[in-house]
Image (cartoon, rainbow, N blue to C red):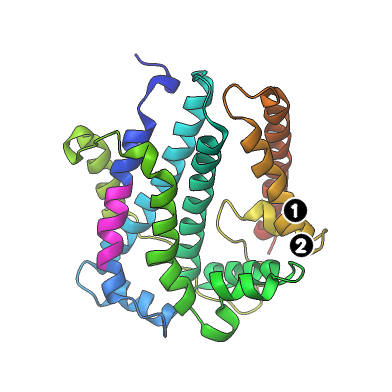
Amino acid sequence: MKSLVEIKWGARAMVALYLSLLSGLIVALQYNPAHPYYSTSIIDTLVPFGGFWRSLHFYSSQLFFLLIVLHFIAVLCNNPPSLPTYSWITLVSSMLVALLLLFSGYILRADAVGSSAGRIAENILLSVPYIGRTLASMLLDIEYGGMKRVYVNHLVGFGLLWLVLIWPHIRRYMVGWRQFPWLLLTVTTWSALIPAPMEPSKIGVFHINGPWFFIGLQEILRYVPPFWAGIVWPSIFVGGLFLLVPGNAWRRWGSFLVLGWLILYLALTILGLMAGAGQ
C-alpha cells in the first residue's frame, strides 16, 4: 500500500475542482446576488435537483481545498529539490486564493454563517490603515453593494487569479475524469444524501461560528483589535509558509513557526466551538 505522502493528492484535487466548476456553473445560473438568501433557498426547494447541485458544489469545493492542502503537505514530506523562490511563493499564494474562493462561497449564501463571516471580513479589511476602504471595496463591498462584488470575485476574479498563479504548475499534468471513479461516486453520492448547510438567523442567538477554517480567527478577534488579529496574525502564518521553500536555509525555522501557529490556531478554534456550543 502506498504511504500517504505517495498518493496523488494533486490529481484528486483537480477532479474535485472539475466537479466544483460544473456544479458551480449550474448553481450560478439560478443565483441572484440582489436577493442572495432568497435565491439560495429557492435553489434548494424549487429548482429541479437544485439541492443536489448546490450540495455537490459545496462538498466538492471543500474537498478540493482539503486535497490541495494534503498535496502541499505531501510535497514537503517528500523533500523535493530546490525550487526558485518566486515559484514557491506563487504556489503558496494559489492556496490562499483557493481559500478566498471557498470563503466567498460561504458569504454568497447569505445565511447566518455567511452574513456573519462577511461582516467580520469587511471590518477586518476596513481596519487596514490608509488602504482599508479600497481593499474592502475591491474584494467585498458588502456594506454598499450587497453580494454583487463578492459574486463577481467568486465567479471571475479569484478564479482567474488562482489560474494565473497555478497554471505553470498544472499545465504539465493532464487529469481525466475516469482516473478516479470512486472519488466521483463518493462525492456525488454524499451530495445526493446530505444537503449542503443552510443556517437561517435565529432570534436570541448572539454567537454564530463562521466557516470551519474561520473559527480560530473569529475567536482571536474577541481579544485582539481587527488589524492585528485579521491581518498581522494570518500574515505570520503566510510568512512561515514562504520560508518552507525547498532548499531555503531558513526552512527549519519556518517549520517551527508554521507548526506553532497551527497549534495555537487549533486551540482558538476549539475555544470558538465551545463558545458556540454554549449558546
- Neighbour tally class for label 2: few under 14, some 14-19, many 20 plus, Cα within 10 Å: some
Residue at the extreme top: 1
User: Mark 1 belongs to which amino acid?
Assistant: Val
Using the image as rendered, state which of residue 222 and residue 81 is in the foreground: 81
Q: Residue at x 54, y 38 (%)?
A: 86
Tag 2 residue: 227
Q: Residue at x 20, y 36 (%)?
A: 181
Q: Residue at x 68, y 35 (%)?
A: 258
Magenta span: 17-26
Q: Secondary structure at mark 2?
A: helix
Left or right side of 18 for 67: right
Residue 43 part of the magenta segment: no
- Neighbour tally class for label 1: few under 14, some 14-19, many 20 plus, Cα within 10 Å: few
* C-beta proximity under 8 Å, tags 1 and 2: yes
Can residue 219 be seen here? The reply is no
- Where is residue 40 drawn, in percent x and y? 37, 74
Q: Is residue 239 above or below residue 249?
A: below
**Mark 1 vs mark 2, CA separation in Å:** 7 Å
- Where is residue 238 drawn, in percent x and y? 64, 44
Tag 1 residue: 232
**Dominant secondary-structure state across the stretch colored magenta:** helix
Q: Is residue 79 above or below residue 131?
A: above
Left or right side of 107 for 173: left
Q: Secondary structure at mark 1?
A: helix
- Where is residue 241 drawn, in percent x and y? 62, 37
The part of the image, by quadrant, that contains residue 222 is bottom right
Q: Earlier in the sequence, mark 1 or mark 2?
A: 2
